[in-house]
Image: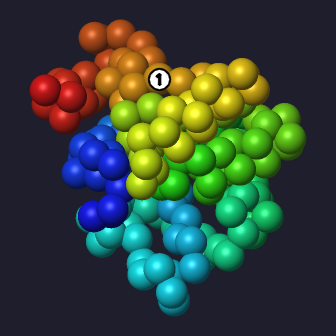
């Protein structure tokens, strides 16, 4: 993360997304790219994941991500690094499997901002929804009458 452009913000937003998901009983899955050489996920991220898939493929579907999804899952929200490699290729792998894909734009990063921007443009052209963590949180809540509204609001603010 130290080499990721605006890495502290990406980390903070990814954690916030996972926290909101857990509050709302949305499954949180993680992936680690070649942790033997690149190191494991950040512990504060990994601790929020129900399961973590170790992979060497850039598309996490090639390592079994699609099989880890809950039965009947119609869409997936992605966050992480590197946006122009693993996030991009995983999004394409999920699209190929007929799943809807949303990328939390403020919870993804790359070493270079130009790579991040190119990835976001390509994902947008492919039909991936590009949103923010706050947008996702309120879409999952649907109403201020949701029993977890105040808990989620504390994370948003």
Q: Is residue 100 above or below residue 18?
A: above
Q: Is residue 70 left or right of residue 2?
A: right
Comparing 113 with 95, the one in front is: 113
Quadrant where the image shows the C terminus: top left
Name the residue tied to disc 1: 131
Crowd band around label 1 with a 10 angstrom C-alpha radius: few (<14), some (14–19), many (20+): some
Could you say where residue 78 lies in the image, as x and y percent from the top left?
Answer: 54, 43
- Residue 97 in view of the camera: yes
Residue appearing at x 51%, y 87% in the figure? 37
Side (left or right) of 37 relative to 56: left
Quarter that holds the N terminus: bottom left
Residue 39, x across and y down, in percent = 42, 81
In this picture, is 114 found above or below 55? above
The answer to whether residue 137 is visible is no
SS at badge 1: strand
Q: Position of residue 141 (x, y in %)?
A: 38, 20
Q: Residue at x 51, y 89 (%)?
A: 36
- Left or right: residue 46 versus residue 75 is left
Q: Residue furthest bottom?
A: 36
Residue at 42% x, 78% y is 40
Query: Could you say which quadrant of the image residue 100 lies in?
Result: top right
| Residue 141 or residue 14, whichever sits in front | 14
Above or below 143: residue 26: below
Q: Is 41 in front, or is 124?
A: 124
How many marks do you count on the picture? 1
């Amino acid at each position: 993360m130290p080499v990721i452009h605006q890495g502290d913000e990406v980390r903070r937003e990814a954690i916030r997304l996972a926290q909101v998901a857990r509050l709302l009983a949305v499954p949180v899955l993680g992936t680690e790219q070649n942790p033997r050489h690149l190191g494991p996920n950040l512990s504060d991220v990994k601790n929020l994941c129900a399961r973590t898939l170790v992979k060497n493929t850039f598309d996490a579907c090639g390592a079994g991500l699609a099989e880890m999804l809950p039965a009947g899952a119609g869409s997936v929200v992605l966050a992480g690094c590197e946006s122009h490699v693993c996030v991009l290729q995983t999004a394409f792998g999920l699209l190929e499997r007929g799943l809807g894909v949303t990328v939390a734009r403020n919870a993804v990063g790359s070493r270079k901002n130009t790579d991040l921007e190119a990835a976001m443009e390509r994902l947008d052209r492919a039909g991936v929804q590009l949103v923010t963590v706050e947008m996702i949180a309120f879409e999952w809540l649907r109403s201020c009458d949701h029993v977890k509204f105040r808990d989620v609001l504390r994370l948003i603010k």
